[in-house]
Image (cartoon, rainbow, N blue to C red):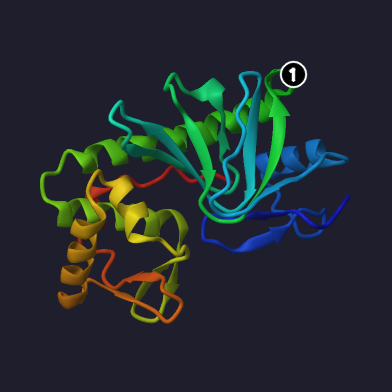
Amino acid sequence: MPPSLRIEQQTGQRHDLSADALNTTEWRRALEEIYHGRNIFSFTSGQGIPLHDQELWVVGRGIVQLNTLHACGDEVLVGLALPSMPFGLSFTTLDPYVAIALTDVALIRFTIAEIEQSPQLTASIYRHLKRRLQQTETLLSLVSNRRVEERLKQMLLLLQREIGHPVPGGVKISLRLTHQHLANAISSTRVTVTRALGQLQEEGWLWIDKDRQIIVSDPGATSGQLYRPTPVG
């Protein structure tokens, strides 16, 4: 089996997709079985990912941003597909529905027929879709908050739970986010988000490291307001 694909854990750590390194979870076992001899599709950060009715993608490495557009042309974040998560047109009624590589990504493509023929994959897809639903509910709830600073906090807490890893003094969000990315995610403007980030830095709630990545200094302070994702293998 080719050793090039790595399936990342939710913490951002990576694991070789091979018999001696692969976690013995149902999902990763299923991916290992199906992956043999299949193509891995790579997309660079910012690149659009083609979506087709009878196909879905599973993220092997990286993060995919899922968006829709308002009639006025404003882009709206509706989800983030993280390692092991599926996404595709079969899971949405939104039109347009756009998938963009937020980081460099490696994806595996399946047809709906392949999923339907594998009870193991079907069950695993369901578990990860449940996590996506919880994520979407959180995005909806944070947008309803009138205060931009609070919306931004909630978004950063969501990200640190999904892709953060502990560092001295806090939790680092392992993704270089632009102010525009954050503005789109919380239905605000880049200027307003820049101002709010500055305020949160002054308060000591977060800081920016030398790699321009955000570190949430006290994630436990308000994390109870967010969902706790259902553990998945």
> Which residue is at a point 74% across and 22% down the rendered structure image?
114
- Secondary element type, mark 1: loop
User: Percent from the top left, x then y, of residue 171?
Assistant: 38, 69
Q: Residues within 10 Å of mark 1 (few under 14, many from 20)?
A: few
Measured along the vertical axis of the image, is residue 142 above or below residue 170? Answer: above
> Which residue is at a point 35% across and 38% down the rendered structure image?
75
Q: Amino acid at mark 1?
A: Gln
Q: Quadrant of residue 216?
A: bottom left
| Residue marked by disc 1 | 117
Give the camera-side residue of 230 and 169. 169
> Which residue is at a point 44% across and 42% down the rendered structure image?
230
User: Percent from the top left, x then y, of residue 186?
Assistant: 26, 46
Decide if residue 40 is on the left or right side of residue 122. right
Measured along the vertical axis of the image, is residue 91 above or below residue 136? Answer: above
Measured along the vertical axis of the image, is residue 95 above or below residue 50? Answer: above
User: Percent from the top left, x then y, of residue 215?
Assistant: 35, 71
User: Percent from the top left, x then y, of residue 9?
Assistant: 58, 56
> Which residue is at a point 52% across and 43% down the rendered structure image?
100
